[in-house]
Image: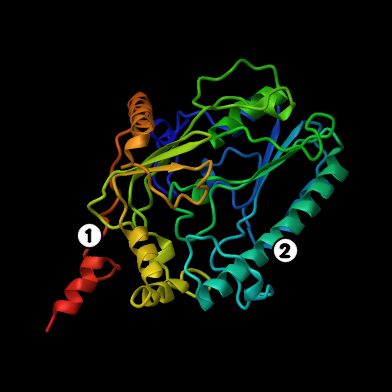
Amino acid sequence: LMPARHGAEGNHTFPSPDVPCLVTELKRLGYEVAAMGKVAHGRPRDQWAFDVVQPASGYQTLRRNVRQFLRQRDSDKPLCLFVGISNPHVPWPLPAKTPSNDVSLPPTFIDTPTTRTHRAAYCDEIKQLDQWLGELRELATERLGSNLIFAYSSDHGGQWPYGKWTLYDYGVRVPLVVSWPGVVAKGSVSHAMVSWIDLLPTLIELTSDAAPMNVDGQSFADVLRGKSDSHRDRVFLTHTGDQAMNVYPCRAVRTSEWKLIHNLRPDLAFTSHSDLLRKPGAGAYWTEWVEAAEVDQRARDAVDRYYRRPEWELYRISDDPWETRNLAAAPEHADVLAELRASLQNWCESQGDQPRLLAAPRPLNDRKTWAPEYWRDRAERP
């Protein structure tokens, strides 16, 4: 289900008690369901539905717990094991092992020394994650055999400007890697659009002959089996935020060619952990971005674009993957804009989606944020 239907709209909030979830459905089908690491994040222990829970998330502790669990387990039940790996996640460990000059920066970034050192540390954690996933898959195969569905995904993009806490592709387009010997072709790549809400019906279909559930998700089992190279023609996206640093609500619809973002409060400044959490290994680079904006027009445009979101953003992501050219006002794309606006509005109405603010966003001229009005006001003061 999407957030408006399951009730967990804000960060670190939980679905309504009557909402079906993957854990309870798998248990109903006879599975033992275990969770290791950052799973059921922040939920009281008495509300967990898992058969086994070990929430420690440090790499070494997590690796030890997973190994011990798999080697000591003697149940005859089929197993679904969730392993929540917290990294890559701020604060990224400094100093980085990867040389800062070896990293590449997205075109939406401002190239500063701290941006590069933080990017290098971020890459270090991705390398560590890749190694750990290989170890985990090898261990799972050793203990559970070859009839094993091994899947990896991420809940959002990296905590960077235009990434996490936003509806740009850098924040919502995440990896999905699935291995299943004899079913998923080794080395195959699919460009089918799927959504996280599709995971539940997909896993239910793959592991049982249970009837389809009344959920928003759609099974993409045929994509995994190689029977189809397409799934959804569009995906709907929402962001509500938390109650502190990122409270800017927005909605979006994405097709294979276009993305339309609706920023619900264009009169207010967009903020997130990326600009407000200015700590080493997190957003310390943002101070350099603001300083660069005082003397460099490109940097000024980048910072202004970050804080100031127009009501509508339309991107042809097929040839503008970093979403840098807003075409919402282009007359030649008026038909595309109208169709996607209607599609998004109809979907929001069907969901009963009523966007709300969980806390007060900052006004555009707030002195705690960067905005052209602030710099003009400062220049005009005697």
Element on which disc 2 rests:
helix
Left or right of 242, for residue 380: left
Left or right of 323, for residue 187: right
Element on which disc 1 rests:
loop
Q: Residue at x 84, y 30 (%)?
A: 182
Left or right of 362, for residue 340: right
Residue 16 placed where, x, y %? Answer: 42, 34
For residue 163, above or below residue 282: above
Can residue 95 be spotted in the picture?
yes
Q: CA distance from mark 2 to mark 1?
A: 44 Å
Residue 276 placed where, x, y %? Answer: 38, 67
Label number found at residue 60 = 2
Q: Quadrant of residue 246?
A: bottom left
Left or right of 77, for residue 109: left
Say which label, 2 or 1, has the lower sequence index.
2
What amino acid type is highlighted by mark number 2?
Gln
Q: Quadrant of residue 302?
A: bottom left
Label number found at residue 363 = 1
For residue 369, above or below residue 315: below
Residue 201 placed where, x, y %? Answer: 60, 26
Label number found at residue 78 = none
For residue 358, above or below residue 299: above
Report the front residue among 8 and 112. Answer: 112
Q: Residue at x 25, y 67 (%)?
A: 372
- Give the colouring mode of the picture: rainbow
Quadrant that contains the C terminus: bottom left
Q: Residue at x 61, y 60 (%)?
A: 88
Residue 133 placed where, x, y %? Answer: 74, 52
